[in-house]
Amino acid sequence: MSITSLKPLNLTFPDTWWRRNQMWVTPLLLLLPAAVVFTIFVIIPIFQSITLSFYDWDGINPKKWVGFSNYTELFGDEVFWKAIFNNIWWLFAFMLGPVFGLALALFLNQNVRGIRLAKSLFFFPFVISQVVVGLVFGWFFNSQFGLLNELLSHFGVEPLALIEGENTATFVVILAGLWPQVSYCMILYLTGLTAMNGEVIEAARMDGAKGWNLLWHIILPQLRPATFIAVVVSVVGALRSFDLVSIMTLGGPYNSSTVLAYMMYEQTFLNFRYGYGAAIATVLFIIMDVYIAFFLYSMLKREAR
Amino acid sequence: MAEVSLQNVRKSFGAVDVIKGVDLQVNDGEFCVFVGPSGCGKSTLLRMIAGLEEISSGELKIGGKDMTKVPPSNRGVAMVFQSYALYPHMSVEENIGFGLKMAKVPKADIEARVAYASKMLQLDTLRQRKPGQLSGGQRQRVAIGRAIVREPGVFLFDEPLSNLDAALRVQMRTELSQLHQDLKSTMIYVTHDQIEAMTMADKIVVLSAGLIEQVGSPLELYHRPKNLFVAQFIGSPKMNVVPAKVAAVSGDIAHVSVDGGSMLALPLRGGKVSVGDVVSLGIRPEHMSVSSEGVMQATVKLAERLGSETMLHLSGPGGAAIIVRSDGLASEKPGDVVALTMPAGCCHLFDAAGIAIVNGALI
């Protein structure tokens, strides 16, 4: 059959308003739901919280304007400084997340039998709920019937009260938090390693790079995007740490393991001091903002290059 | 400056044998090309010389020293990869100088060598650029520069031109040949492109399924292929092969009947055949011509007019596909029935197993 025996095709399209404008209307329409939800549930509450921090309110009686007195009280509050201090500990300790994550990723980035299973198992801590992680670590370190002391007793070591200790509780919680964080960083690095051109590594081997040299000069620079994300999520994770504290220690003993997010929750919902809680939230918000501004700045600077 | 010798070199991945015993001698200063179809093991063999793949058994010597188990960086070889494999985060000069930096060469010496190599490869103005800001040809030059500064005895090239466009490939081909003449180093070059092999090589190694089929100079392989595989792999368009039968042998002359009836008298030049043998008759497209004295009838199916020449695609006796390289102004049209000449001195005979019995007498 020759093509001329077919019915002639009409390949012109009607010139409608939609056809002329869809290039800019479509993205707007797609953005709209997220923009609405984000405004209602994030933007507006931020301003409400900041406003609330200037009031004294128990959630039932009328709000009372108190100006900056929530803040003056906060900066004189020992627990607040303890929380800030602990958050800084979290921050430093969480920087081990990318380090151990990288080490694990390098170790697991090989082709041997059963490696997929191994990778899945190492990723497991990130998949399970933080509540479960908290419970497992809480039980493990429990001084009376925890597994740790059970093990130590076989070596004749006196039982340790780490999670109940004023000076050690925070570190036990941080350890529990680090476990899933390492898994997360590991996955980030593993994807980075998979995407790497194997010939580049071989070229480096031909050039005589091995061990630390290879890691430092060739592999790490190529993993920079992964490192960047890993550090960012670790910082955010450290600053907003709340769930593990709540599950394992309730900030105790004597507020020794509290962090800003937990203190905020405690003051707001347990002590019914909504204004004071909002003031803590605002401080945390400003700390995060400083960090995010720095993060965006360095990211944009990199992209501009 | 170094020669490379392989003795019974083998490679297996688990139960799969990839290189099945290769003996090869590449002389000092030689440009040696490994050629073969995909999966023949040519890249693996090169990577074994580089040290990137372990040698399962056998011995590798470079410059007379046993290098079978020596790590890649200590073999005195440098490699240019198919994907160029430049370090994406380093500038051109850092890329070129990295190997020297690893070897703890003093900074001033690195600088001098990088400057020399960049000049030689016309990269002077691009030294601060990152690989991402370079064109394919420039990246290729950086990869070569990285090899040059190490002053290796042996250069290894793994299909270095396959990612370049056609025009650039032709240019880089001549540049690489020039480089070889300037440096006078041993070069081993892997390609699946037989034109690259023919134009650049002093010595071609044809590989198939992990074994060497033939080693020789380009013209030797072209005119005296040891078997059908080499005969058909080297040369474009491919050598024509038509089934034939030995009808009679008288002294040193074999009378061969090509399917379709025509008879050819071929000098055996020492080759052994007996009457009744089933053979394959091979002849290159440029050695056949359309002529009234032709011995074989064929129908023109297609005439590819390239200007300088015309490729006539014909259907021979029994439907055998035949290509004849004819004059650029050849008058034949599809549908024409023509007679083809097959000069005896250009004909090759292969036995039923594909082994050459007689090669043409051109060289």
Image (cartoon, helix red, strand yellow):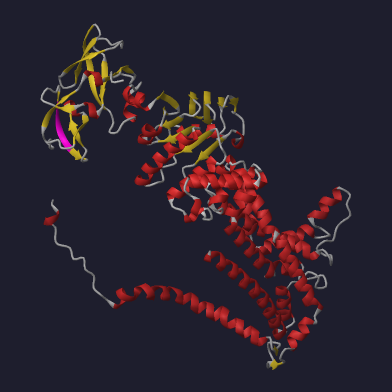
Judged by its main secondary structure, the magenta piece is strand
| Residue sitting farthest toward the top | B251
Q: Is residue B300 magenta?
A: yes
| Quadrant of the drawing holding the N terminus of chain B | top right
Q: Is residue B231 above or below residue B117?
A: above
Left or right for B299, reference A91: left
Q: Position of residue B78 (x, y in %)?
A: 54, 38
Q: Is residue A224 magenta?
A: no
Q: On the image, which quarter does residue A98 sit in?
A: bottom right
Q: Is residue B263 above or below residue B38?
A: above
Q: Is residue A72 above or below residue B155?
A: below
Q: Position of residue B160 (x, y in %)?
A: 44, 41
Region of the chain picked out in magenta, as a range = B297-302
Residue at 50 percent across and 45 percent down: it is B143
Viewer-nearest residue: A150 or A212? A212
Left or right for A210, reference A83: left
Left or right for A240, reference B45: right
Q: On the image, which quarter does residue B203 sit in?
A: top left
Viewer-nearest residue: B89 or A198? B89
Viewer-nearest residue: B87 or B137? B137
Residue at 35 percent across and 74 percent down: it is A22
Q: Position of residue A125 (x, y in %)?
A: 65, 57
Viewer-nearest residue: B179 or B354? B179
Q: Is residue A107 visible?
A: no
| Quadrant of the drawing holding the C terminus of chain B | top left
Q: Position of residue B38 (x, y in %)?
A: 41, 36
